[in-house]
Amino acid sequence: MSGSLLVLGTSSGAGKSTIVTGLCRSLRRRGIAVAPFKAQNMSLNSYVTRENGEMGRAQVVQARAAGVEPEVRMNPVLLKPGSDVASQLVVMGQPAGELDGDRWRAKGDLLELVVEAHDDLRRRFDVVICEGAGSPAEINLRSSDIVNLGFAAAAKVPAILVGDIDRGGVFATLIGTLAVLEGVDQDLVRGLVINKFRGTRALLEDGLERLTGMTNRPVLGVLPVLAGREVDTEDATNFSSWADGPAPLGEDVLVIGVVAFPRASNLTDLDPLIDEPGVVVRALYRPEAMADCDLVILPGTRATVSDLGWLRARGFDVALARRAASGASIMGICGGYQMLGREIVDEVESARGRVDGLGLLAVRTEFAARKLLARPSARLADGTTVTGYQIHHGVVTRESGEPLVGDEGCVAGAVSGTTWHGLFENDRWRRGFIAELARASAKRFVVSPVTCFEDRREARIEALADLVDQHLEVDALLALVDGGVTGRPPARVRLVRDWPQSSPSERQ
């Protein structure tokens, strides 16, 4: 077996990433060598590979599901939004400038590169499960498309289309998506999937039959809602996806508040805390919400100076200063760590020059043109090896205070900071951190002695694969992989522009 399949969605959030993750594990269970692929990802949740290249976290967890090492060919183009109109462009794991509205269509020039990355994977693996982005019905972007049907046509990859029934209107969105596509693009879409269903499938059967009749495409599965099974979410600012972790082992809970920056990045740093029994993680939009928090975290951000201005405009700066003076715990990660320092000199990201920080740590940050991408580690006094990864332009210099881990970071009283992402994934270090936080909070909180974050993530991946095996026609999907785009395509859905035009009186 050799080939690829592209998983498209009628919209962002339809469940493409989740389905690809489950499919990768399902195929691995069958002994098939499988790799994930997403030509272009727009996300602030990213990761550093062994080769010190940057890629989206969603493809990292998909690689884990497939049982292979993540590599930048699995996500050759990454867009990291820094504002509503501009994103940093990362190509094959390395920064390649800023992409704004004037240059947006020029990214179509990267089509050859992404096809080459895909073809390299296809030569090395039996099956490549590809993921689209947003919706293929964004017809204003079709001429520069390198991730949806533009990619599928160039790489000769068949596609399936996923619709989210939980949002409502799933039949209209599936049919409508096909209807606005040009005929040659319709030919590439070979099947439909309905995702996030609540209820008994028998209630859908009449609708599924009509859907097949109207689109000339089979429904290859109806997946139930996957609440609580998401893994390494793609959208960094989707705070609403957080859920309380397991019940506490003691009488009290620990409350961790995370400042909800507009350009927050790498919020997957917090997933291990969310999984801890009795730890409640919630987003903070107003400084008053910090009052009952045992710890406040300033997370990473793609726009440090801009988000620092957002923080000040809402009064967080004053509230954080009062919190630090009272001895209550504050932690900054990457961009949040930079904000806690005395000053930031930025001629690179914001071009604002010198900006005062919050002054809660004796550190200074100066932005360098070259982005640092690294996977550091440190061996602690007790023999524990702690690992993480770094993604930043801001070079932080500690002027006083103690390091947080190894020689990295800064601690001054109850305020701490680090440039390392993924620090909380180190189970022993995390449990020690939580135990110290519980002592400082004087709560009757019992720290779990056995929580292993990687095991919990692995269990979620297994659960996704179980659902895929139970609710998707995997053999039919593999037949699409084997057949590719050869053979006779399904009949086309009429294009909207070809629909008969009626007068206003006829439409009434």
Image (spheres, helix red, strand yellow):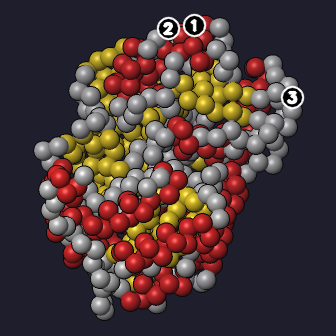
Q: Secondary structure at mark 1?
A: helix
| Residue at x 40% of width, y 78% of height | 213
Label 3 to label 1, Cα distance in Å? 28 Å
Image position of 484 with respect to 253: above or below: below
Q: Are marks 2 and 1 in contact (CB under 8 Å)?
A: yes
| Mark 3 crowdedness (10 Å alpha carbons): few <14, some 14-19, many ≥20 | few
| Residue at x 46% of width, y 11% of height | 315
| Residue at x 60% of width, y 26% of height | 257
Percent x, y of residue 243: 64, 40
Is residue 297 shown left or right of residue 237?
A: right
Residue, disc 3: 251
Q: Amino acid at mark 1?
A: Arg
User: N-terminal of the two: label 3 or label 2?
Assistant: 3
Mark sitting on residue 322? 1
Q: Amino acid at mark 3?
A: Glu
Residue 244 visible in rendering: yes
